[in-house]
Amino acid sequence: MTFQKNILCIGAGYVGGPSMAMIACKCPQYQITVVDIDPKRIAAWNSDTLPIYEPGLDEIVKEVRGRNLFFSTQIEQGIQKADIIFVSVNTPTKTFGAGAGMAADLQYWERTALQIREVSQSPKIIVEKSTLPVKTALAMERILTATDNGVRFDVLSNPEFMAEGTGVRDLESPDRVLIGSRETPEGLRARDELVEIYANWVPRERIITSNIWSSELSKLVSNAFLAQRISSINAISSLCERTDADVTEVARAVGMDHRLGDKFLNASIGFGGSCFKKDILNLVYLCRQYGLDEVADYWEGVVRINDYQKERFILNMLGAMFNTLAGKRICLFGFAFKADTGDTRESPAISVSRRLVEERAELVITDPQALPNAERDLADIREGISFVEDPCEAAAGCDAIAVITEWDLYASLEFKKIYETMRKPAFIFDGRNILDHESLFRIGFNVFPIGKPPLTHF
Ligand code: UDX
Ligand code: ADP
């Protein structure tokens, strides 16, 4: 069969894998190849156990793999064949040199740009899907056109807005698809080609276009606004705890104002994930570079409140458990940064675990999807930490349960039975407010929610 277009995606991660699977599913007329430098990742994409857990993804991949979706390590061959190349390599925060801890580390991204330039023999549209600091598309264009090998490249920005855990639904029915391009005739032609791909399943009015820089900035700003809402409600949760107000009641009253809306107002132990912190720090770095220190300080506050919320959780545990955690056994319910994913990047569970170990507590960690990642994240402090799949087994013999991830299954456990197997006094710290606090209290637990008065027997 001959395909209408050859599409390549460089980077088979949380973004590249699912987004290409969706294009393949909706557009059987295109051939899509996803390549990666990591042969183990590619092998996993070609196996029955995909490298990431995302509800609904297995079914889609099974349907299209070998039909018009292929996973491969042959990057150069892929580049040569492709008409359109999506770049979704990872862009973690820099850990060294200028901008360390703030700016994006662009080494993987630059290596990809150089490789595309070296091996391309025919014109290509390059689509940036990785989250990158504003104006990196321009840098990509500069790298690609630095040597005149006669090949034409058009660079577009097409940020991915899907969230993990709901990735398939978000990709199938996105709120919007944003495409940034140069406003030259060639740039607009390239843009239209990408619009045509999405128009196979996304209503036209939801495909919006802009200049490249607006598109890049929109991604950073969207994530900054979402994270800001969580830090706002979390900041209020600390006030609620001091004043006997209930943060859930406050959030409901606030969210019913249609100008504000009721989404993203769940007080929590703090936000995690690969995007929020990284994107805000990128934004902060960018503002500082342009001398906008007040603006940078404002956004940095969102990250500061998030760190404060995680530390507050630990201090609340310490205070409640008579100011010592040494030798106490604490069970973490959940390690993923949110429910319905096995991803643990920037999960609050990581810093909470490290702090609890610092306080010399023993940890038992349970999670339905994230235990392999948890073991990797805590490899350097593994002693004294056990990993147990079954939550009831994990809690047995513990002094406290701390809910870190809002997995549905935790709300329907038989807590009466769990209580009987725990040391007394038994504590529950509900970092997600997903449990029935009153009934836990009646069973005998001392219950510490987020942003609500605690329910204690002493
Ligand atoms: C986010 C953006 O939502 C998405 O648009 C972008 O493409 C990538 O970054 P993601 O990080 O996958 O997606 O998950 P999201 O649902 O945004 O949750 C991020 C964190 O915030 C999680 O730790 C979650 O538990 C937390 N959260 C979310 C809260 O603490 N309270 C809320 O009300 C909502
Ligand atoms: P994201 O959440 O942004 O998708 P991931 O870390 O899940 O990030 O995925 C990024 C993928 O990009 C990884 O699988 C990594 O091996 C791959 N990658 C990084 N650099 C290159 C490169 N130069 N060529 C091909 N793949 C790369």
Image (cartoon, rainbow, N blue to C red):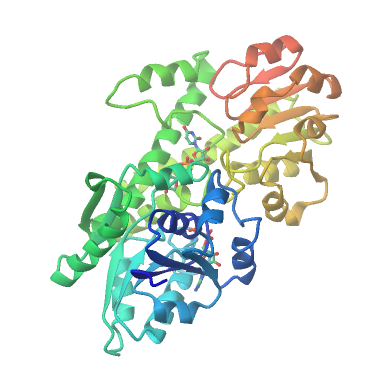
Using the image, determine if residue 60 lies above or below residue 226.
Answer: below
Say which of 455 and 373 sits in front.
Answer: 373
Q: Is residue 267 left or right of residue 181?
A: right
> Where is residue 9 drawn, in percent x and y?
44, 67
Using the image, determine if residue 248 lies above or below residue 224.
Answer: above
Q: Residue at x 48, y 20 (%)?
A: 247
Q: Residue at x 75, y 20 (%)?
A: 415
Location of the N terminus (image quadrant):
bottom left
Count of numbered tags: 0
Using the image, determine if residue 422 lies above or below residue 121.
Answer: above
Place residue 48 in its image quadrant: bottom right
> Where is residue 11 drawn, in percent x and y?
49, 66
> Where is residue 390 drawn, in percent x and y?
77, 36
> Where is residue 90 drawn, in percent x and y?
49, 63
Q: Is residue 413 left or right of residue 171?
A: right
Q: Is residue 287 left or right of residue 380?
A: left
Q: Residue at x 53, y 37 (%)?
A: 270
